[in-house]
Amino acid sequence: MTKLLPVPVTTLPRVQDRMTFLYLEHCVVHREDGALTAKDERGIIHVPAASLLTVLLGPGTSISHQAMSLLGECGTTAIWVGENSVRYYAHGRSLASSTRLLLEQASRVSSPQKRLRVARQMYCMRFKNEDVSGLTMQQLRGREGARIRAVYRDNSKRTGIPWGRRDYHPDDFDASDPINKALSVAHAALYGVVHSVIVALGCSPGLGFVHTGHERSFVYDIADLYKADITIPIAFDVAAEEMEDLTGTTRRRVRDKVFELKIIETAVRDIHQLLGTEETEDLSVNVVSLWDYQHQQVAGGSNYAFTMDDDPPW
């Protein structure tokens, strides 16, 4: 039996240098050296695991222990999703070994003043040519609602697709009309990409600033920055073209647009900016320290015991 060696951490691409996502369903996923393989009745494909940001595992997917081991070694996030990728079930490990960004995120979420600053900054990112720094959160929510209505209205006029309102049925995908189906699929694909960036950086998907109370609150915070430029126009285009494979076409176009607009790089930069951290910081450094209320942290791996001849450390 061939022994598979782990992938060296130093050879792994940074999260912002990776491709977007790979969606798989009704196939068997295995490992061949450093490549992920997917096999169905049509044949087999090989994909370098380290080049992927995330793998979306849909219905009918069977994945081997060796394949999951490879994804873990490469820091590629595995996300288990439902049919049409519109339901999220679970995700795998992070690419980051450091908790630097997670601690900063928790610090800012826990302080009402810091949280307000981050939330206001998120809204400011959506109004690039306007000064909204002096508006209250209620006023910002109102401006955001008006902005999104205008985006839907403009895309409806551009494509000729009538628009009433967002009508999403989580338990019955087929109950929606084509435009709402396309929006659900497009948003789900974008959520998968953003979710992968967040966990790859070591942040928590659940610690949101604008959204709260949900396990993916921070995912929705970041994804909302890009919907007007990506998922909404794509959904209206696909609905207007009356594509037979609406879900597959929508996913592929989101994937291509995410790559074209370099959304992964943008999301990494935006998260660092919102959390006030340096993008160049090495998050793969695996150092265990001990917390200290006076010095913040002290070196781990040391014995801090003292003898009777020593002065006590307190």
Image (cartoon, grey):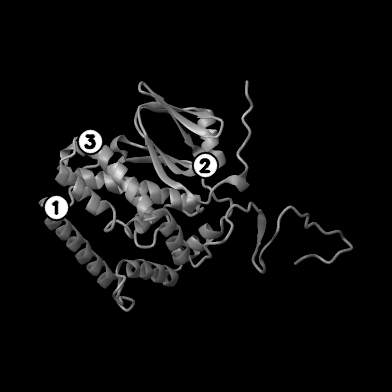
In x, y percent, where is residue 107? 50, 64
Q: Residues within 10 Å of mark 3 (few under 14, many from 20)?
A: few
SS at circle 2: helix
Residue at numbered disc 1? 159
Q: Is residue 270 above or below residue 255?
A: below
Task: Name the one closer to the observer, 147 or 4.
Answer: 4
Kindly report the distance in space between the C-alpha atoms of the residues bearing marks 3 and 2. Answer: 29 Å
Residue at numbered disc 2? 50
Q: Quadrant of residue 268?
A: bottom left
Q: Which mark is residue 245?
A: 3
Residue 138 appears left or right of 243: right
Residue 7 appears left or right of 238: right
In the orientation shown, which residue stands out farthest toward the bottom?
134
- For marks 3 and 1, the one nearer the N-term is 1
Q: Residue at x 38, y 53 (%)?
A: 219
Q: Quadrant of residue 134?
A: bottom left
